[in-house]
Every structure is written in C-alpha cells, then in structure tokens.
Amino acid sequence: MITSSKLKSVDFYRKIPRDLTEASVSGAGLSIIAALCMVFLFGMELNSYLSVSTATSVIVDKSSDGDYLRIDFNMSFPALSCEFAAVDVSDVLGTNRLNLTKTIRKFSIDSNLRTTGHEYHSEPATTNIKHDNEVHEESIGGSLELTTDNFDKYAHQFPITVVNFYAPWCYWSQRLKPSWEKASKIIRERYDPETDGRIVMGRVDCTQNGELCRSHHVQGYPSIRIFRKGSDVRSDHGHHEHESYYGDRDTDSLVKTMDNLVASLPSESQKLSLGDKSTFASHTKRPAPSAGGCRIEGYVRVKKVPGNLIISARSDAHSFDASQMNMSHVINHLSFGRKVSPRVMSDVKRLIPYVGSSHDRLNGLSFINTRDLGANVTMEHYLQVVKTEVITRKDYKLVEEYEYTAHSSVAQSLHIPVAKFHLELSPMQVLITENPKSFSHFLTNVCAIIGGVFTVAGILDSILHNTIRLMKKVELGKNF
C-alpha cells in the first residue's frame, strides 16, 4: 500500500514554508503587471479563436452551374425606341442569337428615364414582308404630302389618318412607295375625302421634317402609323396614342387594311372591340411606342467562352439613319450568375469584407453621348469575369458569385451604332475557404500564455531582486 510519504516524493510542486519567503514591493509590481499581461493576451487569443480566418486559392473553374452563365441586366436607353430595340448574343464558337425576346422585357421611357406606360410587347418578327413585284418608276401621287405645318390639320380633320414616315434614300421606303401611292389612289377613289372623309393616306419625308418625325418617335424607315381623330393626346412626357402597322406592304394588303380600319368606325365603342377581335389586326397592328426611349431588363444565358452581348436597333424591313442613332445608356443593374440575396451577401461581407464589392460594379453608371463625339458612335464595355466561391468550415458553400472588372470606351462605327459588352470569362476561379480552429489549440495557447508570462515575470523579479541587493552592498562598502 502506498503511504503518504512515498506519494509526497513525486510532488513536482514542492512548497516553501511561508516564513522562509520574503515579499517585496518590486515583486508585487511585477505580479500586477504579469496578471494584466495574462488578461490582455488571453483576450487577444480568445478574439483570434472567435474570429474567422480564410485561405484564398486559385483553381481551375469547376462550376456546378454547367456550361452556361446567366447574365441579369436592367438598362435604360433614352434615345432608342422599344419598337426596334433588340438584344443579341454571340460568341467565338459561332453562336449568334438575334433579337432575344423570351426572357427580355421592354418599357417605353421618356427623357427622364420614367416609364410612360405598360410593358411594350414585340410580336415575332415577320421575316418576309410582301411587296409589289412591279416597280413603277413614276407613280401618280395618291397620298397627301404632309409637313410640320399641315400635319395636325389633317390628323384632326379625318377620323383615320394613315401616314407613311419615310426617307428617300431608304431601300425599304423606295420599295413601299409604288404600292403606297397605288393604294392611296384606290382609297381616295373609294372614300373620297371631299364626300366621304372617313380615311386619308399621307406621307412624311423625314429628311425634310425631322422634328415632326422625332416628335412621333420615328427611328426606322418606313414607319406606317395609324392616327385616329381625337386619340393623339399628348401628356407631359410627349405620349401619343396611335398604332403602328407591321403587315405586308403590297397594294392589296394595304387596301385591305384601310377597308378594315374604315369598318371599325361605326361607333367609338365598337372601334376598339372590332380592333381587338380582328385576327388580321392583331398580327399587323400594335400600339406605337409611347416615348422615344426604352428600358430593357431581363436575363440571357451565354456559353462560358469569350463573346458579346449587344443591344442595338434591328429590323428586317426597316432602315436606320446611323448618323441619328444615339446609344447613350444608363446601366441600372448588370450581374453574372445566380442572384445572391441581400441577406446572404450581408453574411459574406461580415465574414469577408472584400468579397462582393465587384459583382455589380457598373450599377448606376451613365454612358451618355452628348454629340461632342460626333455621329455613328458605338459604346463598348470590356468585362473580365471571374468566379468566386466561399466555403465555410463545415464544407457548406455559403455563396457562389461572379465578380468582374470593367473598362469602357467609345468608337466610331461604319455601321449602325450599338451598345456592346465584350465578355471574357476566366477559366480559373477564386476559392475562399474558412480555416477551422480547434479548441485544443486554443487551450494550448492559453496555457502557454499563463506559463510563459509567469516564467518571464519570475526571471525579471529575480534579476531585479539581485540587482537591488548588489546595489545595497556597494552602498555599505562591503566586498564580495
């Protein structure tokens, strides 16, 4: 049986009788300082244990979202009509998708970027608009020549005024001219303006009456507009209530359209109901843009290869005056990948403040052509996109986002000006992982702090005590 005397022999911490120890003022001061150092270092170690530390590495992109990348955007174009605004996507692999509409929404806006009505719905583009085969060089004018001075007079005189806004240099205007004049002559004979007066067909040369065409938001030629008496009401933002015609342009189709318009006249209440129920009208007529600008929002999916996102004016049956096109725009929002909720992004910034600062860096920026740069100006943005993943200590993927750098420039274009976004997607990704911290490591460091401070304080106390004793002996004149 182990006796207490044998057990005491393995005591590592043998005690010195209290009457053999001596307290000193210097020792008390060092003890207080040592205790404060222990508390301070313990607090620092506890703060380090509770804080998040991360490791950043660059690896080959191993995205879980497949081969396609989603681009969300919301942009305002003060001088681009929703009637012709188109979103195109292309890449180096040969993909070329034009005039995307399925995931895109368009709203007419005024010069102050305020919406002026409901969403603008674009019908599927008609690839082959019919024109007359026979082209008469000299057509007998059957339509009224309208100008800035007499336009309002005729628009308010006849119940229905159908106007061809054209440009003499335009190929499509030249193809329309013979059938338009021939149809106008037939309608004039059928519904004589003097005796019947229910409908009249006119034409406006936009090269001579530019302000008139701009006031009706005409940007492509030819544009056929249908004005109904009393419906061309202007509000404070220049809003016009009339329709655009997008049907065939041969003589028979034009005459048939005019007959249908006249048939809708018996009463104001029947006018709208007949127009809504007519299958022919629904395919060939749509409300004209209520303002000269357009807000385009939605998303597209692109392959993860270098490519372009292009916003421009596009039509297979209209011409555009490149010198008059202004692609100024305001980027309300532009981001890549899945949308990150504000709560998740807040958590990420709390852990890693520098993450998320570049995932929407173009938001709120304006790119305006004040005409000082001249005409035919294309605005280009060069974006380099890098994926970032944040993984917590429990292998939980907190966020997966795409950040990008952006450099913008303007360039003179030989073709129709556009707003172009060049996309360069990096094959690498940034991986940020949270470093785990063990509790045992924390305890070890706490013990090291206590033992280390205690030992250092003891050494300092010994040095101080012996120094004081030596000084006293010198003062007393004693020798060693």
Image: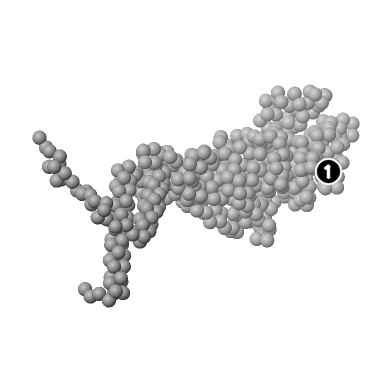
Q: Nearer the viewer, residue 90 or 464?
A: 464
Vertically, is 258 above or below 378?
A: above
Residue in the image at 48% along x and 41% along y:
347
Q: Position of residue 406 (x, y in %)?
A: 52, 54
Q: Is residue 436 left or right of residue 344?
A: left
Image coords of residue 393 (percent x, y): 36, 41
Rendering coords of residue 366 (x, y %): 63, 52
Dot 1 crowding, Cα within 10 Å, few <14, some 14–19, many 20+: some
Q: Is residue 311 left or right of residue 281?
A: left
Q: Is residue 218 visible?
A: no
Where residue 102 sits, quadrant-wise, is: top right
Tell me which corner region of the image, top left, top right, bottom left or bottom right, holds residue 245.
Answer: top right
Instruction: Please report the residue visible at 76 percent of the width from the left and 36 percent of the height from the top.
Output: 242
Taking the image as drawn, is residue 28 in sight? yes
- Position of the N terminus, as image quadrant, is top left
Near-viewer residue (60 or 311):
60
Answer with the quarter of the image where residue 394 lies: top left
Give the x, y percent position of residue 408. 56, 56
At 76% from the left edge and 40% from the top edge, which residue is drawn? Answer: 239
Considering depth in this image, is 69 or 44 the residue closer to the camera? 44
Residue sitting at x 63%, y 50%: 329
Name which residue type carries label 1: Phe
Would residue 153 be found to the left or right of residue 303 on screen?
right
Which residue is the site of mark 1?
151
In depth, the one of 230 and 40 nearer the eye is: 40
